[in-house]
Image (tube, grey):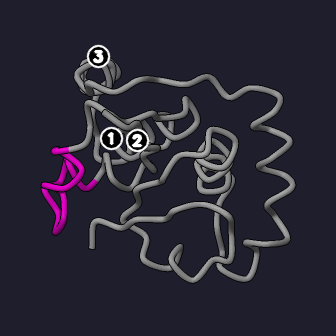
Amino acid sequence: MTAIVFDSSVLIAILKQERGYEQGEALISQALVLTINLAEVATYLARQGAPFETIQAILGKFPCQIVDFTNELVAMSGFLYHQTKSFGLSLGDRSCLALAITRNLPVLTADTAWTNLSLSVDIQTIR
């Protein structure tokens, strides 16, 4: 099985069962997710009013590999700023792309704007 990097938008789409979520569900056991992107999912859940214990429980049920936000990924995320700023990508978005680039893996997102990026990474969307 080939690994794939998940953006937080895919995990949120799975939780909300939004259009395309089935593709994310089918690949989640192969997924790598950065801690910073998991924090974005936690923030989404908190905004929806979920208590701390519920957030912990939901995050713990994702059958994916959690990857720490290392110094290399921090540097790559910053480096990607100029290449992505016109597309409005967040730190979390750039961090997700940094993981995919440094590991030479495809990335899966729900954000179709990413397909317009000129980066050396295979960007796939669930929509």
Drawn side of residue 62 relative to residue 79, left or right: left
Q: Amino acid at mark 1?
A: Leu
* Residue 29 in which image quadrant: top left
Q: Are marks 2 and 3 in contact (CB under 8 Å)?
A: no
Q: Are marks 2 and 1 in contact (CB under 8 Å)?
A: yes
Residue sitting nearer the eye, 58 or 83: 83
Q: Label 3: few (<14), some or many (≥20) within 10 Å?
A: few
Query: Measuring 85% from the left and 71% from the top, which residue is drawn there?
Result: 82
Query: Measuring 25% from the left and 56% from the top, which residue is drawn there?
Result: 13
Q: Which residue is mark 2?
A: 41
In the image, is residue 15 part of the stretch drawn in magenta?
A: yes
Drawn side of residue 36 relative to residue 30, left or right: right
As helix, strand or loop, the secondary structure at mark 3 comes to: helix
Q: Position of residue 28 (x, y in %)?
A: 26, 37
In the image, is residue 30 part of the stretch drawn in magenta?
A: no
Q: How far apart are labels 2 and 3 at the CA level?
A: 14 Å
* Residue 58 in which image quadrant: top left
Residue sitting nearer the eye, 45 or 41: 41
